[in-house]
Image: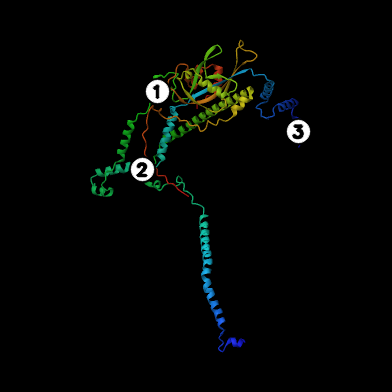
Amino acid sequence: MFLSLMGVDGHVSQGPWFASVLTLKTSAPLRAEPKKKKKVDPRREQMVRERLKKKLKKLERVPPELIPIEDFTTPAKYMDETRVRGAPQLPFEESERRALLLKEWSRYKQTQHRAEMEAVGLAVEAQREALEELRLESEELYQAALRPDPLLFPFNHQGPSYTPPKAQYEAPEGKYNNITKVYTQ
Amino acid sequence: MAAPCSRMANRPLWRFITNVRRTGLKHTGVRQISLSSACRAATQTRSKTEGVPSPWKLYGAVCLQRLPVISQERNPIEDQFAELMHQMELERSLLSDHEQRLLEDSERMTRKQADNYDSDEEEADYGGQETITAQDQEDTWEQKLKHFQPALRDRDVGGTPLGSVERCLGDSLVLLVQQTVGKETIWLLPQAQWEAGETLRQTAERGLSSLPGQLCGEADFKATFLGNTPCGVYRYTFPKEVRTERCVGAKVFFFKAFLSAGSASQKEPFLWVKKTELQRYLKPPYLEKVDRFILNL
């Protein structure tokens, strides 16, 4: 039976239904390939997208560049030697006068500081006494005095200037170009 | 374990008793400043709980200060030092852009006036533009400055009256009013008597707003009070004729305030005085207490 199936040349010559089975076998993968494309390609595209996203995340994990502090770097134009003023040679008397003036100034400032500290100490002492007396009077008023005032802050006051303010004076409007560099991270 | 026991043993007996009495009364557990005041406070609060009112009348007063408007004159040493600092800064500095421009301009002028001046060479460099020299700019700036006339610093030369807010712009001034206390009319910081149901700060505000000028609508003081705490107290006993069981004397509590806006016209009842002039108007014991919290800084 097998010999009859095998045939003379060894060529497998099956009956006609065998041939159709073979053709089925050859055509089945041909027919199934478009179906495989629909499954695999979205998966492949997804994989590609995921890989890109992972790469982006790795790049983003790098810490942001620090904003340079412009005050800490000396601009190049100030390193120019032509800008240096001639250092004056001070005579001996002048340097002596300067040293003595500095010492006198430190003494003056010391007395001023001591006076200020004393004045503040007296004021604090006066307040403490006032609170003590108030406590003796009535507890209720004392507690009311200790409560902080929410309306006090923010407190604004125009400090002293060199000349007193002029009545009905309109200051001229100033024009300016703002050239500050703005850095974004 | 041993240490606390030894401490208990060392404490004298009378202190132990007062401690017990104190803790018995005060459940709040407030710290005492000194033992004597603690005992006094304990007795006072005990009398409070028994329903006896205090024998002191309470007043709230306001210390209204007008802060300086212009800077003070410099001392001779301050003058010298400022000059020295300016000189030293100048010596240690580099040339600015403006100064460099001045130098360049002056160099160019000398080159122009020299004999071997080649104007074509110069103009090739600068493109033949008419440049405004730095010196010209400085002159225009000076001219502009001369157009502006600032207000004079010392306006007191004319002798502004003591009641005006505009006097002594370099110092901080305190408001004084004349009020009748008892039988006399004396100068003092504006005060009002405390009424039940208000805090002392409200009393002080009332004292300020109920001044005779304020009521007429002439003087209008807008004051910012610095907090609810009094800055000082003045306690005095009434003379023997007025003294009764109920009121032995009075306590005046002072509150600090800064003048934020004031009207120009004031009548006689007001006085704006510097700290050094206070002694001319206030009585010595009053001045002693008030002087402490008025800072001349």
Q: Which residue is mark 1?
A: B155
Label 1 vs label 2: CA separation? 40 Å
- Which image quadrant for residue B44? top right
Co-location on one chain, circles 3 and 1: yes
Left or right: B18 in relation to B68: right
Farthest residue in the bottom direction?
A8
Q: Are marks 1 and 2 in contact (CB under 8 Å)?
A: no
Host chain of mark 3? B
Instruction: Look at the image and tell me in which quarter the N terminus of chain A lies.
Output: bottom right
Q: Which chain is disc 2 placed on?
A: B
The answer to which of marks 3 and 1 sits earlier in the sequence is 3
Residues under labels 3 and 2: Cα distance? Answer: 79 Å
Kindly identify which numbered label has been placed on residue B6: 3
* Picture layout, residue A171 above or below residue B286: below
Q: Vertically, is A121 above or below B246?
A: below
In-image side of B250 versus B47 (left or right): left
Q: Nearer the viewer, mark 1 or mark 2?
A: 1
SS for tag 3? helix
Q: Circle 1 — which element?
A: loop
Q: Are marks 1 and 2 on the same chain?
A: yes
Residue B81 in view here: yes
- Amino acid type, callout 3: Ser
Which element is circle 2 on?
helix
Q: Residues within 10 Å of mark 2 (few under 14, many from 20)?
A: few
> Could you say where residue B249 lies in the image, as x and y percent from the top left?
61, 16
Identified at 54% across, 22% down, the residue is B204
Residue beneath disc 2: B97
The residue drawn where x is 55% and y is 81% is A19
